[in-house]
Image (cartoon, rainbow, N blue to C red):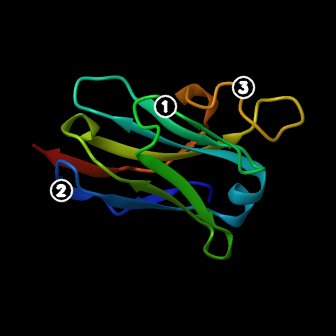
Amino acid sequence: QEQPVESGGGSVQSGGSLRLSCGISEYSRRNYCLGWFRQAPGKEREGVVGVSTDGGTTYADSVKGRFTVSQDNAKNTMYLQMNDLKPEDTAMYFCAAGRCSGSGGYYMLFPLIRHEYSFWGLGTQVTVSS
């Protein structure tokens, strides 16, 4: 079972913080590139951060300096720490995993593009009020 499982969403005021969690299989953690995506109502799903198997990260410009991804290998869990949240961060947040498409098989060629990823969680809702 490679489907990620997200948790940790909620409602916060502008400027607040949340930490999302993504439970993944050990196989996914060791072998797949991972990512966080989000989708607001009426909008396309967009990449937030991509993570290569060596821990390299690619953040969307809109979240740089505010969001931080991390992993707890012992728990097979990936986290997304979100600080200084803004109303425009309101969205359903998804965790994704997929075979790395880059040369050598440890990074994604396009880490913020949804079609690079094969396995998706059901999402967790984040709502930021002004």
At label 2, which amino acid type do we have?
Ser
Report the residue at 90% width, 35% height from top: 104
Identify the residue under disc 1. Answer: 60
Other residues around mark 1 within 10 Å, as few (<14) / some (14–19) / many (≥20): some
Q: Estimate the x, y position of residue 24 in percent, counting from the top left.
A: 59, 61
Other residues around mark 3 within 10 Å, as few (<14) / some (14–19) / many (≥20): some
Whether residue 52 sits left or right of residue 68 in the image: it is: right
Identify the residue under disc 2. Answer: 11
Does 53 sit above or below residue 10?
Answer: above
Q: Which quadrant holds the N terminus? A: bottom right
Q: Disc 1 versus disc 2: distance between alpha carbons?
A: 22 Å
Q: Disc 2 versus disc 3: distance between alpha carbons?
A: 34 Å
Whether residue 61 sits left or right of residue 125 in the image: it is: right
Nearer to us: label 1 or label 2: 1
Report the residue at 80% width, 29% height from top: 102
Q: Which quadrant holds the C terminus? A: top left
Q: Which disc is residue 30 wearing? A: none
Identify the residue under disc 3. Answer: 109
At label 1, which amino acid type do we have?
Ala
At label 3, which amino acid type do we have?
Leu
CB under 8 Å between discs 2 and 3: no
Whether residue 101 sits left or right of residue 83 in the image: it is: right
Report the residue at 29% width, 49% height from top: 84
